[in-house]
Image (spheres, helix red, strand yellow):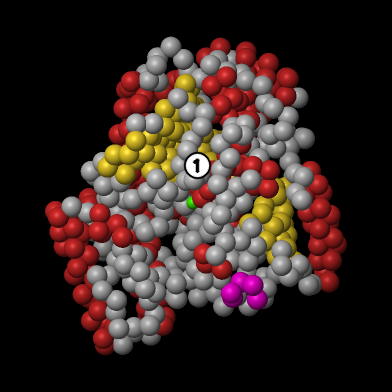
Amino acid sequence: MRILTFLAACCLSASAAPNIVFLFSDDHALNAISAYGGRLKDVAPTPNIDRIAREGMIFERSYCTNSICGPSRASIITGKHSHLNGFRNNDSDKFDGTQQTFPKLLQKAGYTTAMIGKWHLVTQPTGFDHWDILPGQGSYYNPDFISENGKERVEGYCTDIITDKAIDWLENRPKDKPFVLMCQHKAPHRPWVPAERHYTLFDDVTIPEPDSLFDDYSDRSDELKKQQMTVADHFSWGHDMFLPRKPEDPRFLDMALGDRRRMKKEQKSAFDAAYGPKNEALYQKLAAGMSDKELTQWKYQRYMKNYLRCVRALDENIGRMLDYLDKSGLAKDTIVIYSSDQGFYLGEHGWYDKRWMFEQSLSMPFLIRWPGVVKPGIRSQALIQNIDYAPTFLEAAGAPIPSDIQGRSLLPVLKIDGEAPNDWRKAIYYAYYGERTHHVAAHDGVRDDRYKLFRFTKTGEWQLFDLKNDPDEMHDISGDPANAETLERMKALYQEMRTKYEVP
Ligand code: CA
């Protein structure tokens, strides 16, 4: 099969050794991408990201292996699950850069490789001819970058600067070789500080609330009640809500907004002028008395507007890159992908953040444009995962796919209009190993095209969800005798997947 698709790839004359531009962001939920038709498509559309779907293929069942920043990135770059690439959590793991990665394999295949923006794998990048990255999480304003030449601070807004640097690299790259460019944004990661031009965007609208904003976690494991990632109780006054001082109200955690400290005098003035009146209105409301529900709704609006403002700058910059590829003549020979390291809760289940195997954070956007290979306007239902990106890039480049890579090249799916071939995977395997932050219990599980089964590692408790009848995952049906057969089938699938992926 692999030999056949390899030969097929080589026969595509227009796409022999195509360039690859991997546009990537951090924590971008499907509900905040209008091409996905999500909850916020009308209030906050993303026309430039949507353009990739319109001119290419959008995957509606695209998932991560482990829903946090570092681990997802490690799975992408190695094509392997966390237990094999060694990066299971952001607390204590560092990426072992001596291992096999797709950029190194592409270099061997004659590609120039570049990594610009948020890297977040702790150790220095390896396998890149050029790299210029944000240290750690990076900053929205006047961010520092580190590269082979040391550290520099660049004045301006992070999302704009990363695109500037990426376009600058494209302009000045060695022109005698095909290239892979990984252009990886910080946005829309917490603390959701927008570009100055977007500070008042959405001021006059109300962002729709999800049905489960006030989820009480009944009908599911008590483990759900132990997390600390709710809109209601786990936002800090400064870092998350942009208030200038701690309100005399216990319903805010304590942390100032570090990004404001990095701003220059005039940047601070613009920030304070935009948020000051909105903040004063809140202080007055708090003094008059706000119910828990009213305050949660206010926090949700503040959170969502800032998140969506960050998405707006991101979308504008994706547009800027697509325009550059057109103008430079690169578009026709270049695969363009848009993805993000995992999904995010935009108030669903009362949450922000990620980590859980529930759909909103398990899902990753994956949109791909490949002129001459991928027909425009196709929506694929194939079950794909971030371990598939590495083998896809290798096969597209005409390079061999090492047998220890666990993902599968998407080329067969791309070539048959988004249909999964008969021997495609029937389910995906997921594992979250737990971190100190947010107190989400470790769990792993499987998802097929209808059901999701997951198991809490510590308690051994099972959760089973029927995604067809309960798409919001509000009811664990594992204890219902009517589902005994499904439960047994999914447990067998869980064991099968753990064996297949060599989970210890
Ligand atoms: Ca992330």
x, y percent for residue 246: 29, 76
Which amino acid, mark 1? Thr
Magenta residues span 222-226
x, y percent for residue 61: 61, 46
x, y percent for residue 2: 72, 24
Q: Nearer the viewer, residue 445 or 173?
A: 173
**Which residue bears the numbered disc 1?**
123
- Name the residue: 59% across, 25% down: 105
Residue 304 placement: quadrant: bottom left
Furthest-front residue in this view: 150
Q: Is residue 492 visible?
A: yes
- Name the residue: 71% across, 63% down: 457
Quadrant of image for the N terminus: top right
Q: Is residue 225 magenta?
A: yes
Q: Secondary structure at mark 1?
A: loop
Total labels drawn: 1
Q: Nearer the viewer, residue 456 or 45?
A: 456
- Name the residue: 63% across, 37% down: 79
- Left or right: 197 with respect to 177? left
- Left or right: 375 with respect to 483? left
Q: Is residue 307 magenta?
A: no
What secondary structure is the magenta-colored segment mainly?
A: helix
